Amino acid sequence: MIAVVSLLTALDRSGHRATEPRRAVATLIAAQPGHFTAAELVAAARARRLGIGRATIFRTLDLFAELGLVERLELPTGGHAYVACEPTHHHHVVCSSCGRTVDVGDLGLADVAREVGRRTGYRIDTHRFELYGLCPVCAAEARTTEPAAEPAARPAVGSTVGPARR
Amino acid sequence: MIAVVSLLTALDRSGHRATEPRRAVATLIAAQPGHFTAAELVAAARARRLGIGRATIFRTLDLFAELGLVERLELPTGGHAYVACEPTHHHHVVCSSCGRTVDVGDLGLADVAREVGRRTGYRIDTHRFELYGLCPVCAAEARTTEPAAEPAARPAVGSTVGPARR
DNA sequence: GGTCCGAATGATACTGAGTATCATTTGTTC
DNA sequence: GAACAAATGATACTCAGTATCATTCGGACC
């Protein structure tokens, strides 16, 4: 969960202007409890009559992403969402129900990548790793609710382990 | 690299019809040297005057994906591509230059996921992991060519380690 | 405060992957 | 051949993301 101040400070430091629209977007982002889409920010901005254009929201998200303040996640469904986070290298575990996202650090995957590189001859320079499942809150709720009510999210097949694999 | 026969056999086994359009798509897929997009298949079908509709190509890809014969990858650029593969659980290393994709097996990431689950309280049911870099062929070419000519592919920021992280 | 100029903006148009719809065709079974 | 469901092709639609352009804004300088 990132603070508005962090977003604005990073803007300043990078030589970009902390304009009103960017401040407003930062506030919207900081208020998101989990991952979010650009469309959700657009709707929130409209609901609050902020008068911010959709293109501005995309541009601001791009800028924040470039600065490492926001990251774009792939969801199990194949869609994308953004999540605010610290600009250190890390991976995410994402709740497939509420979208809450937790940084889980490096996980030592650089070693895995190195080993694969050694084995295949590929010069690996990038890796991505994401974990999906129910967060403690949603898991507890699911336990309280009908156990037969299974999550609607169907993970995309591919480089994935999960219920879709059958 | 998957054989047309495997694709068609799997169709049969699953109770789906091995229609002419599906056979043609299977042939196109088997001919792809690396990952490919739906648009590429559409173009190839048109070039060969196969008379296959674009919607059919998407539907066939979806069906093959459902059967685990094709997987949808996220590219470092944030876009998507498909790759044919065996329906066992595995991860991919993807060449950022030519798109060639190699299965690298399980990599023991289920253990990583379990540990993260233990640590965070999340009930993790799905993970995805992809590796990107130059394949041996492209790496050799890059070594032969100007070393200053760096790959145009700019990895998306997010759950990623690579040149974008600065 | 005024001026200048580039950064930034909002509105709109555009692109393209992916999906939905519908009339028609195809393939299988009897 | 008839019946019926699966499958198809063409087309329309959706929506995330991007491009364009006239206008506004913000910061530097005087």
Image (tube, coloured by chain):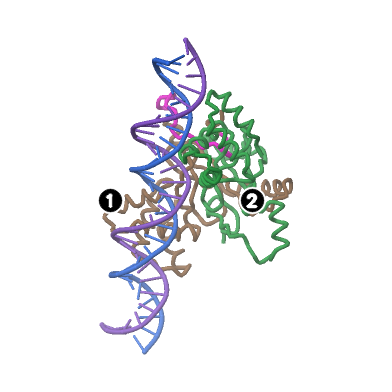
Chain colours: A brown, B green, C purple, D blue
Q: Give the side of residue A113 with respect to residue A78, left or right.
A: right
Question: Can I make out residue B81 in this image?
Answer: no
Quarter of the figure with residue C15: bottom left
Q: Nearer the viewer, residue A162 or A1?
A: A162
Residue annotated with mark 2? B95
Task: Write down the region rendered in magenta.
Answer: A143-161
Hey, what amino acid is under mark 2? Cys
Q: Give the side of residue A118 with respect to residue A36, left or right.
A: right
In this view, the mark in front (2 or 1): 2
Hey, what amino acid is under mark 1? Ala
| Residue B106 x, y percent position in the rendering | 65, 37
Residue under the point 67% across and 41% down: B104
| Residue B67 x, y percent position in the rendering | 56, 31
Residue annotated with mark 1? A47
Say which element carries label 2.
strand
- Real-space Cα distance between discs 2 and 1? 44 Å
